Image: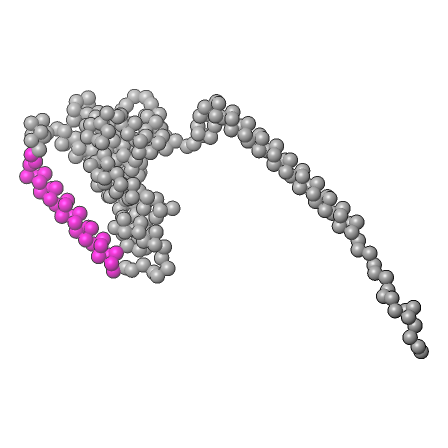
Amino acid sequence: MGFDPRRWSSPPRQPRPVTSNLEGLLAENQALRQEVQQLRRRLAQLERLDRHSRSAGPTGAETQAAPRVTAEQVRRWGERLARQSGWPELRSGGDDSGLRGLIEALNRGSLHPHLTLEQRLDRLAPGLGADLQQALAGPLTKKRLAVLAAFGLYGISASEWLEDDPARVVADLRQRQQRLERPRSQHRQGRRTRTDQRSTDQRSTDQRRSDRQTHQHSAADPAPADADPRLLAALQVLGLRWGASREAIKAAHRRLVKRHHPDMGGQAADFHRINAAYQLLLA
């Protein structure tokens, strides 16, 4: 057979089905347009709601936030305080050494004596003072006065003290009352009895021993190599070792915030650093 040039041309190619692809793209484009329109309408609705909430004042989500202190918590705390052994010795009278006088004395000795207790609490934790005032609405009984005095003594940590150690709260309030019961002349001169001196020296010795033991435990229990450095730093702030329990963290936090609270003569920077470490460890 010879070569036939008529057969040299290649066979005809099949056309691509562009029509179906084009229809799919048009349908997808239309769906995207509809979705964009829905998002724009939703954005316009949110902008209208935002303008309405600003013009109407704090009536939106701000009023729906849960209060920091409730009347039920105050009632429960008061009942727990009343069951402690030193409760009968606490006096709620109107004299300078009663619970009312103690609250005024704690307020006078704070960093902001010109503010009320509620105002000072609001400075430390916005809304706390207002919530406490609302929860204490009504007659100020001895139980309610004791709760209020606890907030005057411990500040923003009062809730944890009232929940975890009501016996310590009663003992601390009673101790404060005893200081107010001393003669005014003796209080101005700053003299202390030998019993007070020995008690203070013993507490200082116990505290140094506790801090020394905490440091020894921290050195004897090294953290793993892959430990989070932020957690290590937070534990060091609270004076704890790696693997400390939640109870130990709470106990260390209560001890340190009482020592470094600005209302108790501590430094605000140390107080905030302790609170930040505590929140990080319990997060």
Which range of residues does the magenta coloring cover? 191-220
Q: Is residue 239 above or below residue 37?
A: below
Residue 56 falls within the magenta-colored stretch: no
Quarter of the figure with residue 164: top left
Q: Residue at x 35, y 61 (%)?
A: 225
Farthest residue in the bottom direction? 1
Which of these two is toward me, 185 or 269?
A: 269
How would you classify the magenta stretch by its main secondary structure? helix
Q: Residue at x 9, y 26 (%)?
A: 184
From the viewer's perspective, tell me whether residue 158 is left or right of residue 212.
right
Which of these two is toward me, 280 or 175?
A: 280
From the viewer's perspective, tell me whether residue 75 is left or right of residue 109.
right
Residue 194: image location, x then y, percent: 6, 39
Q: Is residue 39 above or below residue 116?
A: below
Quarter of the figure with residue 202: top left
Which of these two is toward me, 73 or 227?
A: 227
Residue 276: image location, x then y, percent: 32, 44
Q: Is residue 65 above or below residue 223?
A: above
Quadrant assignment for the N terminus = bottom right
Residue 148: image location, x then y, percent: 27, 29
Quarter of the figure with residue 197: top left
Using the rendered image of the protein, determine whether residue 105 is visible from the camera's viewpoint: yes
Which of these two is toward me, 143 or 47?
A: 47
Q: How many marks?
A: 0
Q: Residue at x 32, y 53 (%)?
A: 232
Q: How is the image coloured?
A: one colour
Using the rendered image of the protein, determine whether residue 84 is visible from the camera's viewpoint: no
Residue 213 falls within the magenta-colored stretch: yes
Farthest residue in the right direction? 1
